[in-house]
Image (cartoon, rainbow, N blue to C red):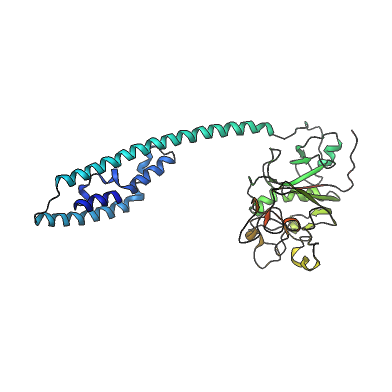
Amino acid sequence: MSHINQCIQSSNIPLSYCGNFVSVCPYILTIFFSCFLLGKKKDDMLGISCSYRQLNKDFQAKVLKEDRTFELSLGRGAFPSRQDLQKCFQERIRLQGQVRLLEHRVKQQQLKIIQLLEKKEIQYSDREDENSVIDLGGKRQYSDCAEIYNEGHKQNGFYKIKPIQSPREFFAFCDMSEGGGWTVFQRRSDGSQNFDRLWADYEEGFGNFVLKNGEFWLGNKNLHYLTNQGNYTLRIDLTDFEGERRFAQYARFRVAGEEHSYEMSCGEYSGTAGDSLTGGFHPEVKWWADHRGMKFSTRDRDNDNYEGNCAEEEKAGWWFNRCHSANLNGLYYRGPYTAKTDNGIVWYTWHGWWYSLKSVVMKVRPADFECNIV
């Protein structure tokens, strides 16, 4: 309204004498350009009329008030000069010119956006080459990636497996490094997946089960079927944003069934990252930092030992205690971070609570695994 007010104040002319309100009012221009930037057609502009109906109502009330004042001034012999009217008319023309210029600039930006979207579609089509789903032809069913490895399949990728008690096959990523035969049940790599999910999502699994570096959670049901086939070793590979890598390994890793809320248990630690999963870094913290024997928690299913809701505060599903010294399903920050709670991808014994790791891989393999030479 600044240009209109300037015109009014300089000439004592009521608002209704300054031309078409819709063509010059900056508020209407703002609505017009917002819709234009969102790619709406001009016909769709009619749909926004209700959003400034009150503004028009207030404006008309002000016009009526100014008109009455103007009429009184005419009664006293006052009348705007031709020069004042010309200034108002020129201001209107100037604003209309700005509208045309802004329309031109918006069209240019829309063209750039279309070009960027087309470029992005090409990039996504190129990424299809990263598809790592491997079809073995359905010749037989495998209970885990260790069996696949010992059948001579040494390529990393997603394979179909069917643990003994599982009612169906499902895709799991097989990591054939570190001796081979590892079944991956969690991966964090770039923050592309939201891990702040409900119980049903964690139970069934979610994420990208196609790309070789995609983020996912295999599913608590599948993890239960997998780890209850025998004695499994858990290995956790961690990478920070400085490029350093460390690992933690736990014996006798197992996840209970749904009736026990997918309670987690594990044995002795070995590795280079420190023992954050059992609170073994200090005996006095085990009462709140030991994740062994903890039921799985999500923000809609609170099974932790904390008076509040750890999953809600930490923005993740996990085996929380009161709350954690390890949370590998936390929010994806880039290294050091600041937040109300320590809700990043945390492994306390390496980088503490206020450093979020770059990548995580959680995987299991039978403890008695022996590599067959094929």
Front-most of residues 48 and 357: 357
Q: Quadrant of the C terminus?
A: top right
Q: In which quarter of the image is residue 348?
A: bottom right
When the figure is inspected, residue 305 is found, relative to residue 327, above or below; the finding is below
Query: Percent x, y for residue 336?
Result: 65, 54
Residue 143 visible in image: no
Query: Percent x, y for residue 251?
Result: 85, 53
Q: In this view, does 117 lie to the left or right of 87?
A: right
Residue at image x 87%, y 48%?
367
Q: Is residue 358 left or right of residue 151?
A: left
Q: Is residue 254 left or right of residue 108?
A: right
Residue 351 visible in image: yes
Front-most of residues 266 and 74: 74
Q: In this view, does 368 lie to the left or right of 25?
A: right
Residue at image x 76%, y 66%?
285
Q: How many labels does the image show?
A: 0
Query: Percent x, y for residue 319?
Result: 73, 58
